[in-house]
Amino acid sequence: MSSVNEFNTDLNSYDYELPSELIAQVPSDEREGARMLVYDEATNQISHSHFSDLASFLHSSTTLVRNNTKVFASRVQARKHITGGKAEFFFLSDTLSSHCVEALIQSNSKKKVGDEFILEGDIKSKIIKRLERKFLVSLEVSDLQSYLSRFAQVPIPPYIRNGEASSEDSTRYQTTYAQHSGSVAAPTAGLHFTDHTFDQLTKKGINVADLTLHVGLGTFETIKSEDIRNHHMHSERFYMSQDEYNKMKNRKILAIGTTSLRVLESFSKDKNLKRNEWNETDIFLYPGIEVTSINAMLTNFHLPKSSLIMLISALIGREKVMELYQEAIDQKYRFYSYGDCMLILRKGYHEV
């Protein structure tokens, strides 16, 4: 598997212009209905297809690796206890530790330790500690998951309807194979899959390995450093059993989405990580860092200057990624979480 020699650390070189009408505001009518741009690195060929044809591009010795994390409803409306000023809490976990949890807080006024809020359901909360971009808050509930399932909204990204969730989002902003609650954003490449998809893949001899990475701030945090090497990713928790890991042995590996790749590459680069245990990773992949754990990848189209577009660039080079994105724009693909997808077949994928 060849490495990508191109090495560009300038943040602005990962920028591109996207017409606003290409930002998907709703999911496709059917999960399998997305368009799919296919790039074959061995032949340097670009083709246009549909996600429903995925199996036709893969051979039987492939293992698909998917992230079975589950998005929890995390956005809760609130008001300042004294002034009544509006606020919104974005919880970063659905479990409490000593009646405390980390959260982002949006409000028009400044926030400081000791500030008190009243959340939906007349639940009291107080800022206990200010962290780098977030707050540690106390919460007067005994079961946070039950509270959030009753009062919180689905955390769709702000570029989708200004973050205002609809009833449809509770099912469509979730993969069909989601099992373990803990994410504040969906692993969006997985949103296209249905039971029918996996049936078609199984008939061809393609198997599936599961892992869990709970998506947190690290995946979607804005990069502000002009030199991307100065950016530090927040850690995210992940788990993969030895049995699931064994499914990849002597197989071609296709990562479903960037979160799956981050787990696989973490295992590849850090031999101290163990299967059957929860681990943490702050891995940041960009050109100049060789990706050795996968042969192919399915991914959606990502935001400009994001760590995700840099990760894709680590696979096939920044210039090629920008070329593919421009092709997708020219062909009027739908972008971002509810948009279309891209299949990357790396050099070596077709080799026996």
Image (spheres, helix red, strand yellow):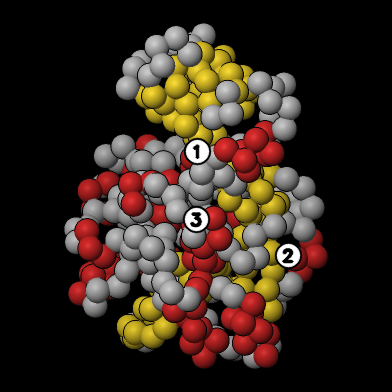
> Left or right of 81: which side holds 38?
left
Camera-nearest residue between 29 and 3? 29
In the image, residue 305 sits, relative to residue 231, either above or below, namely below
Q: Which residue is mark 2?
A: 245
Q: Residue at x 34, y 84 (%)?
A: 48
Sequence order check: which comes first, mark 1 or mark 2?
Answer: 1
Camera-nearest residue between 159 and 258? 159
> Left or right of 122: which side holds 247?
right
Q: Secondary structure at mark 3?
A: loop
The three-letter amino acid code for the residue at tag 3 is Ser
Q: How many marks?
A: 3
- x and y, in percent, of residue 143 in the image: 72, 32
- Crowd class of label 3 (few under 14; some 14 to 19; many from 20; radius 10 Å): few
- The C terminus, quarter of image: bottom right
Residue 297 visible? The answer is no
In the image, residue 299 sits, relative to residue 158, either above or below, namely below
Sequence order check: which comes first, mark 2 or mark 3?
Answer: 3
- x and y, in percent, of residue 112 in the image: 44, 12
Residue that lies at the very extreme toward the front in this rendered image: 121
Q: Which mark is residue 75?
A: 1
Q: Contact (CB < 8 A) between labels 1 and 2?
A: no
> Left or right of 86: which side holds 244?
right
Question: Which one is in front in this view, the residue at disc 2 or the one at disc 3?
Answer: 3
> Left or right of 216: which side holds 203?
right
Camera-nearest residue between 306 and 250? 306
Marks 1/2: CA–CA distance? 34 Å
Q: Residue at x 38, y 19 (%)?
A: 85
Q: Secondary structure at mark 1?
A: strand
Q: Residue at x 23, y 70 (%)?
A: 329
Residue 125 visible? The answer is yes
Q: Which residue is mark 3?
A: 167
